[in-house]
Amino acid sequence: MKTKERAIEEKICPLEFAVNAISGKWKVPIVWRINEGEKRPSEILRGITKVDRRVLNQQLKELEQAGILQKASFNELPPRVEYSLTPLGDKLVEVLWKLNAWGETLLETSIKKDK
Amino acid sequence: MKTKERAIEEKICPLEFAVNAISGKWKVPIVWRINEGEKRPSEILRGITKVDRRVLNQQLKELEQAGILQKASFNELPPRVEYSLTPLGDKLVEVLWKLNAWGETLLETSIKKDK
């Protein structure tokens, strides 16, 4: 079924749609790292040590299909692949900064509670 | 282990902490509905038909422990329980509005791709 039909039938609200798009386990960290200039899967793997290559590739593929990342393949030896944020991805990062600021407040609140 | 120690040990960044706090399956819809004035669990259940009562109660409890919701119990017959957003919860809703706006763009992009 096409996205629009699905959106109408299941009454997908944009917020749900957004949360679904970024709720894969490593998607937020991946977007964050690419925003920080880590373009190649091998660099991202070094940064997020808990994720394996196969899962990373799957998440990168889904983020590309969602229009958040774009992939550039360079026909070199060895072949080189680089990811970057699309304009939609850039906008997501802006929202993630706001969520990060909220997370700081949440973290402070939790620390106070622990004391 | 206390939150602060855990934050240091696992190098929790505020964004990860924020994403974890809201990544329970129904947490975003629950916060959204409470923001829209549905205070009682029975009202929330009518709005989110796919969630069962036990799961809802668990998610409400976690949101309360995180400091996002506050619970008020009224000693009536039958007993009445109402949830509302804390100031931290209000701030989360502000971020969710930004995520909602991003979701609209994402949805439009997906619809264009389907055509």
Image (spheres, coloured by chain):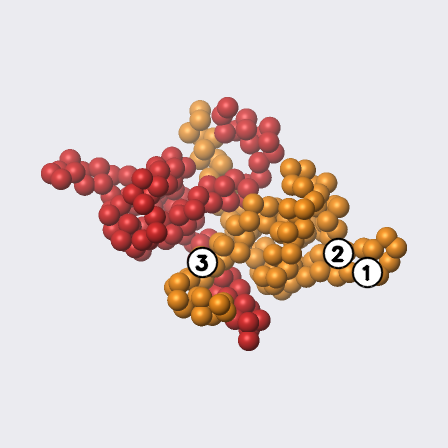
Chain colours: A orange, B red
Q: Earlier in the sequence, mark 3 or mark 1?
A: 3
Mark 1: give few (<14), some (14-19) or many (20+) Cα within 10 Å: few
CB under 8 Å between discs 1 and 2: yes
Residue type marked 2:
Glu
State the separation of the CA atoms marked 1 and 2.
Answer: 8 Å
Q: Which residue is drawn at 60% across and 28% down?
A: B9
Residue placed under numbered mark 3 in the picture: A15
Residue A82: quadrant of the picture? bottom right
Residue placed under numbered mark 2 in the picture: A82
Q: Where is residue B86 in the image (x, y as percent from the top left)?
A: 35, 43
Judge left or right: residue A59 versus residue A8: right
State the separation of the CA atoms marked 2 and 3.
Answer: 29 Å
Is B63 or A13 nearer to us in this picture?
A13
Residue B35 shows in the view? no
Q: Earlier in the sequence, mark 1 or mark 2?
A: 1
Same chain for the residues at labels 2 and 3, yes or no? yes
* Image height of A39 relative to A13, above or below: above
* Image height of B61 relative to B44, above or below: above
Same chain for the residues at labels 3 and 1, yes or no? yes
Is B101 or A61 nearer to us in this picture?
A61
Q: Which residue is drawn at 44% across and 43% down?
A: B24
Judge left or right: residue A80 versus residue B22: right
Q: SS of the residue at dot 2?
A: strand
Q: SS of the residue at dot 1?
A: strand
Residue type marked 1:
Phe
Residue placed under numbered mark 1 in the picture: A74
